Image: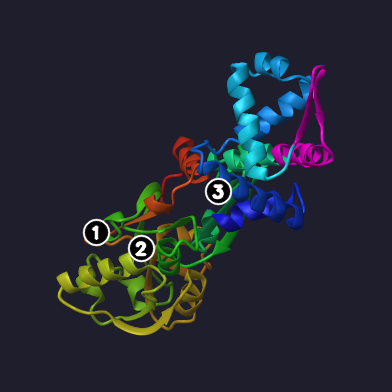
């Protein structure tokens, strides 16, 4: 969070000025705390008001505050500073040389502090800052994801989006370690109860095989019919929850699939199946633009759903994350037709 605030502030003032002002803020905070003053630069604002008005009585009416109380605040400020700010005369107050210098720098300090405070407030409200988004590389769904992100950008143009393609497994790890704010991935929520999620789309698995294969000539009616087949499989770290649940489905059918090759992406898996290396199980959505020599079948007793989820960590939730989730909830998502 410190890094984000720093990057935002860098657009408004140079790093050197920012460091000076933050050091000044810490100085005043330390000294004011001795007198139990709130961290709102009350004494500095009183000082500016007196200089602008020319007299303590006029400044007291403007603030407003009782004149004796304002006088005490100014004396305490001079005591903290260790030098005199004013010459008091019957006509009013006159700044000392030190007071003139202090007045000019205090004006700049408070103006920049207001900028700092406003920018921090914008970040807290999700109107400014950045959002790190991981996306599982599912090319067929990119137009829908783009639609969501474009809608978010139009409403939050000052929130910078950093988008990185990542497999579901690595996204989960990155979210837990606060290296990613939110992710679009395949996830069964019950496997990660400490995370929060919003379902975007529910897909299902289909058997994919070559048109020239024996499976295409005699399509299976249940998982048990696949007992003697060679499988192209996805690596566990790509989608851990789906991997484990799919293996459990095969065990319940009485056998463990014969895996001849593991891959990290659907495109490679389809290519190997197309080359005749074996069959595979893929999300139905991935068959939208499949090679023409591939066919897919839905197996009745393979009821595993594949929820495409928007996932984030409750401990690291920001207003920007909440706004993105809200946009996703309001959108109409396509239904699976495979």
Q: Nearer the viewer, residue 203 or 56?
A: 56
Task: Tell me the distance, in whole angstroms, between the alpha carbons under discs 3 and 1.
Answer: 70 Å
The colour scheme used to paint the residues is rainbow
**Disc 2, SS:** strand
Q: Nearer the viewer, residue 28 or 166?
A: 28
**Disc 1, SS:** loop
- Asked if residue 136 lies left or right of residue 315, the reply is right
Q: Which residue is mark 2?
A: 206
Q: Residue furthest right?
A: 97
Q: Which residue is mark 1?
A: 300
- Asked if residue 192 lies left or right of residue 34, the reply is left
Tell me, yes or no, whether the two marked residues, 3 and 1, touch with CB atoms within 8 Å: no
Q: Is residue 24 magenta?
A: no
Tell me, yes or no, whether the two marked residues, 3 and 2, touch with CB atoms within 8 Å: no
Specify start and end residues of the magenta stretch as a single range: 85-111
Task: Tell me the distance, in whole angstroms, between the alpha carbons under discs 3 and 2.
Answer: 65 Å
* Residue 230 position within the rendered picture, expressed as x and y whole percent measured from the top left: 33, 82
Mark 3 and mark 2 lie on one chain; the one further toward the N terminus is 3
Q: Vertically, is 310 above or below 280?
A: above
Residue at point 42%, 84% (across, down): 277
Q: Is residue 109 magenta?
A: yes
Total number of numbered discs in the rendering: 3
Q: Which residue is mark 3?
A: 30
């Amino acid at each position: 969070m410190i890094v984000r605030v720093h990057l935002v502030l860098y657009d408004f003032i140079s790093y050197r000025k920012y460091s000076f002002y933050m050091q000044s803020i810490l100085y005043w905070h330390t000294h004011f705390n001795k007198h139990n003053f709130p961290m709102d630069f009350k004494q500095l604002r009183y000082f500016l008001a007196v200089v602008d008005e020319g007299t303590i009585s006029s400044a007291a009416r403007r603030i407003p505050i009782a004149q004796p109380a304002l006088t005490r605040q100014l004396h305490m400020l001079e005591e903290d500073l260790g030098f005199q700010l004013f010459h008091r005369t019957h006509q009013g107050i006159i700044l000392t040389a030190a007071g003139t210098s202090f007045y000019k720098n205090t004006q700049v300090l408070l103006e920049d502090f207001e900028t700092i405070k406003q920018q921090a407030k914008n970040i807290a409200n999700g109107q400014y800052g950045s959002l790190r988004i991981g996306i599982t590389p599912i090319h067929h769904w990119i137009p829908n994801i783009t639609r969501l992100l474009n809608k978010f950008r139009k409403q939050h143009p000052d929130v910078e989006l950093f988008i990185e393609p990542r497999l579901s497994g690595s996204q989960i790890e990155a979210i837990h370690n606060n290296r990613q704010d939110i992710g679009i991935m395949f996830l069964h929520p019950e496997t990660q109860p400490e995370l929060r999620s919003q379902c975007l789309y529910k897909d299902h698995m289909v058997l994919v095989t070559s048109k020239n294969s024996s499976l295409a000539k005699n399509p299976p009616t249940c998982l048990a019919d696949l007992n003697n087949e060679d499988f192209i499989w996805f690596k566990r770290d790509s989608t851990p929850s789906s991997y484990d649940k799919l293996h459990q489905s095969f065990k319940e059918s009485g056998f463990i699939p014969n895996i001849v090759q593991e891959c990290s992406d659907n495109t490679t898996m389809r290519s190997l199946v197309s080359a005749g290396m074996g069959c595979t199980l893929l999300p139905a959505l991935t068959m939208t633009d499949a090679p023409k020599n591939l066919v897919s079948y839905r197996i009745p007793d393979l009821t595993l759903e594949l929820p495409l989820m928007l996932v984030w960590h409750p401990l690291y939730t920001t207003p920007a994350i909440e706004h993105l989730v809200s946009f996703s909830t309001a959108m109409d998502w396509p239904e699976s037709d495979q």
